[in-house]
Image (spheres, rainbow, N blue to C red):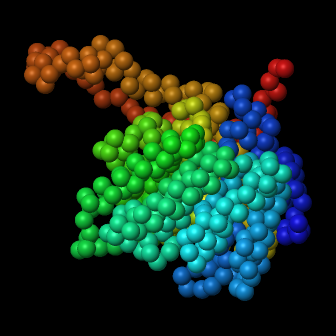
Amino acid sequence: MAEFFTDVAPIRFEGPDTDTDLAFRVYDPDRVVLGQRMADHLRMAVCYWHSFHWPGSDVFGGGTFDRPWLEAGRDPMDAARMKMDAAFEFFTKLGVTFFCFHDADLAPTGDTFAESKRNLEELVDLAGQHMERTGVQLLWGTSNAFSHPRFAAGASTNPDPEVFAYAAAQVKNAMDATHRLGGANYVLWGGREGYETLLNTRMRQEADQLARFLTMVVEYKHAIGFEGALLIEPKPQEPTKHQYDYDCATVHGFLERYDLVGELLVNIEVNHATLAGHSFHHEVAYAVDHGIFGSIDANRGDPQNGWDTDQFPNSVEEMSLALYEILRGGGFTTGGFNFDTKLRRQSLDRADLFHGHVGAMDTLAQSLLVAASLLEDAELEAARDARYAGWGEGLGAQILDGKHSLADLEEQVASGGLDPQPVSGGQERLENLVNRTLWRAVSAPPDPPPAA
Ligand code: XLS
Ligand code: NI
Ligand code: NI
């Protein structure tokens, strides 16, 4: 097997004081935090598409990267095998636990559906061998039902039922591939499940189609005995002007409306949250609180841009707040942190892909320490508990139990029995508490190893 990343040695944990550029300063997979290994808390994954299947092109220019398997004129199956060799070399040198793929980045699209299916099966077999050899696992698989021109007007929400059928066939095969590789989840991102103009769109019709599609996916999951979670990835727009899976709350409402709650969870992407006008913290807190939290696509946007820049995460604060909510909710079950991240187009060196991921992994490891520390000293939670204490007993509990009507409450207030006084929300104190934890957590000594 030819090596591609020949200039890079396996990345090691060397601690915060190391001078080695490509080393982990905080991410130490076996370090125990809140009783669990860092690697098992974070469940990090590299994405196949941006990392290996994208040449560094943008809407104004072609590929800039050194990716020999993407060069024109190669036999597509040879190129796909070469790409897979490089990908697994990268995963193992990085020391990441998982990867994620779309059918279309793993295997070349053939001239016919049957040929695409054969290609996928062959490359799934090969991926299985690489996984066996390296121990790298699959966090999730998905199907690309947005790039091909037939999906320009949507996949399941297309006005043409034959396109719906085509997307169904594709998703069935991608679910089979994911199942075969022992994937922990299957993701559905509705890239073109939205509209460009309302002038030619029936929103209710398209919502019914989407619900029918998802119901078929749920039925198929149970039919094949796939035990992973099904995840919807919300995004408000791009490439379409409006996407139906706008944000977590919209997806949640949709699941309720079509009786799909409990069957599908969400895969929250940081940059999609910010495009929807929310913070990432908001989306995670919503999902955890409402029982629909599944997994994360970790990246970041650029505050000056209104599109999905998919940069590597580097804000410990942003990630810590989200991780705090995740840990509060009990941590990941099937989900994890997938790096849905792109290098910048000028990042031409082979090593740049390592720099992006090493920084991102250290950012998450740092954030885990901060979140664990916030959880352990419990001050944030105590402040929240105190703020809502009135709802746990007396009047508050009675109201929630339906023991009072509007008229009842009017009587109590009118008779002078109630005289509520405003209390401080304490926001600045809590913000300071978070900031103190941010600079303290990372320098704290690691937990002692668990007793044997
Ligand atoms: C695009 C999405 C995509 C999904 C998988 O914005 O993030 O990469 O994660 O189809
Ligand atoms: Ni994504
Ligand atoms: Ni995205």
Please state if 416 lies on the left or on the right of 256 as rendered. Answer: left
Residue at figure coordinates x 84%, y 47% from the top left: 13
Of residue 274 and residue 91, the one placed in the foreground of this image is: 91
Q: Position of residue 90 (x, y in %)?
A: 79, 61
Of residue 276 and residue 410, the one placed in the foreground of this image is: 276
Above or below, 295 relative to 124: above
Q: Position of residue 10 (x, y in %)?
A: 87, 56
Q: Position of residue 240 (x, y in %)?
A: 40, 70
Of residue 25 and residue 107, the one placed in the foreground of this image is: 107
Place residue 350 in its image quadrant. bottom right
Q: Is residue 271 visible?
A: no
Residue at figure coordinates x 12%, y 18% from the top left: 408
Q: Is residue 407 visible?
A: yes
Of residue 106 and residue 48, the one placed in the foreground of this image is: 106
Please state if 283 lies on the left or on the right of 26 as rendered. Answer: left
Residue at figure coordinates x 30%, y 17% from the top left: 397
Place residue 157 in its image quadrant. bottom left
Which of the image's four quarters has the N terminus?
bottom right
Above or below, 71 relative to 85: below
Q: Position of residue 96 (x, y in %)?
A: 75, 51
Total labels: the figure holds: 0
Above or below, 440 relative to 186: above
Residue at figure coordinates x 56%, y 75% from the top left: 112
Which of the image's four quarters has the C terminus?
top right
Please state if 171 lies on the left or on the right of 132 as rendered. Answer: left
Please state if 251 lies on the left or on the right of 72 as rendered. Answer: left
